[in-house]
Image (spheres, grey):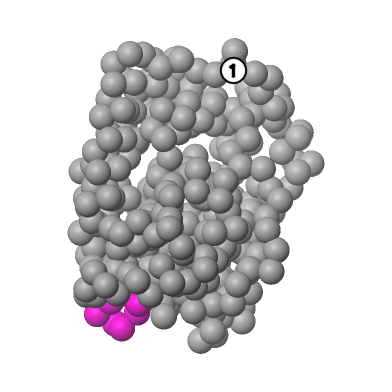
Amino acid sequence: MYDYLLVVGPGRSGSEFLYRLLRGHPSFVFPEIKERCYYRSPRAFRRARKRLDGCGRSQLLCDVANLAYADAKLCRSIEALQEEGFRILLVVLLRDHRDRAVSMMQFRRSRAELSALLGARRLEAAVMRDRLTAERLADVFRTNADILTLSFSALTQDTSAVMDILPSLCGAPKFDRAPQQAVNQAVGARSLWLSAFMHWCGLALRHLGFRRLLQRIKENEAANKAFFVPLADDAERPRLSEESLKALDASALACRRMVENSSRQVREGVYLRKIGQPDDAFSDYRAHPGLTP
């Protein structure tokens, strides 16, 4: 049913979990490393498909591009692909804005990113700038593509339902096993300078084209344990100002209303917007065992 599945949404919304989930299915294939923006042009998309070993008609090219939701060229890029005849399914990830902001602050501290090194106020400001707003979400929904919206809670707590929904939409066989990986586990840096060195080495490897090596390092448990330690309890959670909390709550409410007004709910935390089909077309999806509301 589709040629391309593109996952968008702010970081720390379950993209890594979904990436590992889909990569365990033989019908979903990925480039060497997630977050490569192959949607930018038909030529780049065709090159990406050719580079993937064993990518045939029965396999669906996938990509996880967190920041695509904030890309002003997203609509034009998808339209260009559709003009070439490629069928696209967008997956939008949503997470409670407060939880996501705290998780992102912890993540940036653990990686010793520049905003974290400049102090708590700079870190909070950086996280607020990249939050998902209703305006950014509206840009995504302006694309002329089918959109499946997954909440973080549905993705991580009702994973079996998601494992039925995605293959069903894409005309692929069901998953044969459930993922066992932890989701967005909060960690801290063992050493601030060691973590900063690792972060810049990762950027260098990506820039030089060593993407497969970088992905293997990111997924290596021993490497993660060498750089990071689990955070003990809520005492280590960053604190957000009242002003930021109000802005996050307002954005969350506006985003939720936009999704509910533009999509049909197929189960708790899962919404589907299909282009060019009447309302009763959604009954086909509700009839599927994995899509029962």
- Asked which quadrant contains residue 101, the reply is top left
Residue pushed farthest bottom?
57
Total marks shown come to 1
Q: Is residue 86 magenta?
A: yes
Q: Which residue is mark 1?
A: 234
Q: Is residue 260 magenta?
A: no
**x and y percentages locating residue 62 in the rendered image:** 49, 67
Classify the position of the N terminus by image quarter: bottom left
User: Residue at image x 58%, y 38%?
Assistant: 184
Q: In the shown orientation, is residue 195 left or right of residue 2?
A: right
Q: Residue at x 27, y 35 (%)?
A: 253
Residue drawn at x 25%, y 43% as measured from the top left: 257
Query: Which quarter of the figure has residue 87?
Result: bottom left
Instruction: Please provide the residue range marked out in magenta.
Output: 81-87
Q: 197 or 107, which lies in front?
A: 107
Q: Nearer the viewer, residue 59 or 258?
A: 258
